[in-house]
Amino acid sequence: MLMTLPLAAQSVAPSAAQLAAAVDHHYNALHRLRVNFTESYAGMGMDRHESGVLLLEKPGRMRWNYAEPAGKVFVLDGKYGWFYTPGDAQVQQIPAKKLDDLRSPLRFLLGHAQLTKELDRLTMTPVDSREFRLRGVPRGMEQRVRSLELVVSREGTIQSMTLEELDGSRTSFAFKDEQANPVMAADTFRFVPPAGVQVVEGAPPV
């Protein structure tokens, strides 16, 4: 006789390792990604909310086009990270290998990392029947970061990401309307400093 699994058995929450593997599989299969984002930061006396479009391309390229504040941009061209806000007198240029700001964990979206190897003390708690919270400490960032929390679907798509630093500050990203492997212009990840704007090497801005 054929038997049907009870509904409860069909909806058993996956383990942390199973969810991490689903995230790895989903993003490793992509070459490019376009997704809308909202970003919030609370700390150091600031409470800031921003939004825009994030574009990603392997290997190691990303571009944050901000709609709010309009014109702000962060570009990672594979060799350097560029930070610029219209009206600023300087462009911040940071070697990619020195980028340890809060965007670094987003390399998960570039399919370069395995979550179980990148996050220590990885745990999972259900948010609801379709979404789950993965939480761990990014390896190599222990002196700065208390935890990185990812809300992911059963299929492995990242819905949101929250990074809490040891000083209590929190940066959160929420993602929606993900597009897999969209067509992108050849110069999408090329940044040309505006005329008259000085390029300086420095730390990523908060």
Image (cartoon, rainbow, N blue to C red):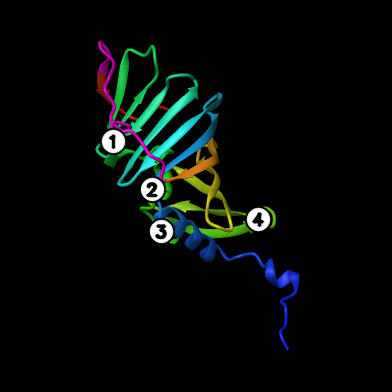
Q: Can residue 167 be seen in this view?
A: yes
Main secondary-structure element of the magenta-colored stretch: loop
Q: Where is residue 74 in the image (x, y as percent from the top left)?
A: 38, 29
Q: Name the residue under label 1.
A: 77
* Crowd band around label 2 with a 10 angstrom C-alpha radius: few (<14), some (14–19), many (20+): many
Q: Where is residue 3 in the image (x, y as percent from the top left)?
A: 72, 82
In 3D space, how far apart are the residues under numbered discs 1 and 4 (Cα atoms)? 35 Å
In 3D space, how far apart are the residues under numbered discs 4 and 3 (Cα atoms)? 22 Å
Q: Nearer the viewer, mark 2 or mark 3?
A: 2
In 3D space, how far apart are the residues under numbered discs 4 and 2 (Cα atoms)? 23 Å
Q: Name the residue under label 3.
A: 114
Say which element carries label 3: loop
In 3D space, how far apart are the residues under numbered discs 2 and 3 (Cα atoms)? 11 Å
Task: Please state the extent of the stretch shown in magenta in the rendering.
Answer: 181-198
In primary-sequence order, the first of circles 4 and 3 is 3
Q: Where is residue 122 in the image (x, y as percent from the top left)?
A: 52, 59
In primary-sequence order, the first of circles 4 and 2 is 2
Q: Nearer the viewer, residue 130 or 199?
A: 130
Give the amino acid type for the residue marked by disc 1 in the picture: Asp
Q: Mark 2 points at which residue?
A: 110
Q: Nearer the viewer, mark 3 or mark 1?
A: 1
Give the amino acid type for the residue marked by disc 3 in the picture: Gln
At a point 37% along the width and 50% down the height, the residue shown is 140
* Crowd band around label 1 with a 10 angstrom C-alpha radius: few (<14), some (14–19), many (20+): many
